[in-house]
């Protein structure tokens, strides 16, 4: 789910500070399938910055919707008396639905930012001292290997070679 890829691509381009950043994004997109929003940017700070701008925009929209709903709920307001009660209820229901969508999108983007930060931290830890490594296994690894599989369930015997990310097994 998440947010549409077109919005993610727009955010990345919108938050670019220089032509060089745009060129780097174009090179990254060309390295995969040509789409800018398919994978997170290699520059994690830029990726998080773009999504935090979206969070700020979503926060503003959520606040505006909440205020509009509160105004519709006020009975003594002279402008609300002129509105037909059925139309008022329809408007409130519509705003409530949009508010739920905005809150869901905001939660997804906030979670995405945290996930990207955690991934960056794990990569830095791996580069600094090797808590995690990547290697190629042909078939299924032996059950007594001292590793925990990051991919579960493991493939069946006789399968193609697979790439696994593993962490050293510490026993339990």
Image (spheres, grey):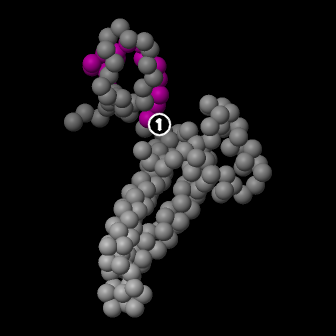
For the point 72% across and 48% down, which residue is it?
A: 22
Residue at position x 43%, y 19% from top? 162
Judge by depth and name the residue closer to the eye, 81 or 5.
81
Instruction: Indicate the position of residue 133 as horizontal and vertical percent values.
Output: 46, 31
Bounds of the magenta segment: 132-146
Asked if the magenta segment contains residue 84, the reply would be no
For residue 170, side relative to residue 3 (left or right): left
Q: Quadrant of residue 151?
A: top left
Residue located at (38% from left, 70% from top):
91
Q: Is residue 124 visible?
A: no
Q: Is residue 102 shown left or right of residue 4?
A: left
Whether residue 13 is situated above or below residue 77 in the rendered picture: above
Whether 95 is drawn above or below 82: the answer is: above
Q: Position of residue 45 (x, y in %)?
A: 59, 53
Residue 143 magenta:
yes
Does 73 sit left or right of 160 as displayed? Answer: left
Q: Position of residue 18 (x, y in %)?
A: 76, 55
Residue 38 seen by the camera? yes
- Of the pair 156 and 103, the residue shown nearer to us: 103
- Mark 1 closeness class: few <14, some 14–19, many ≥20 residues within 10 Å: few
Q: Which residue is mark 1?
A: 130
User: Who's the residue at 35% across and 68% down the image?
Assistant: 90
Q: Secondary structure at mark 1?
A: loop
Q: Nearer the viewer, residue 148 or 61?
A: 61
């Amino acid at each position: 789910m998440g947010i549409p890829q077109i919005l993610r691509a727009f955010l990345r381009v919108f938050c670019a500070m220089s032509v060089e950043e745009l060129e780097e994004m174009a090179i990254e997109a060309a390295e995969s399938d040509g789409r800018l929003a398919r994978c997170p940017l290699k520059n994690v700070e830029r990726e998080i910055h773009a999504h935090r701008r979206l969070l700020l925009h979503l926060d503003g929209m959520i606040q505006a919707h909440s205020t509009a709903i509160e105004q519709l709920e006020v009975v003594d307001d002279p402008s609300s008396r002129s509105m037909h009660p059925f139309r008022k209820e329809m408007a409130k229901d519509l705003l409530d639905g949009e508010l739920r969508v905005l809150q869901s999108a905001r939660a997804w983007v906030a979670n995405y930012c945290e996930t990207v930060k955690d991934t960056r931290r794990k990569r830095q830890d791996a580069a600094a001292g090797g808590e995690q490594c990547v290697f190629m296994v042909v078939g299924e690894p032996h059950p007594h290997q001292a590793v925990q599989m990051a991919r579960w369930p493991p493939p069946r015997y006789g399968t193609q070679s697979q790439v696994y990310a593993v962490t050293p097994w510490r026993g339990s």
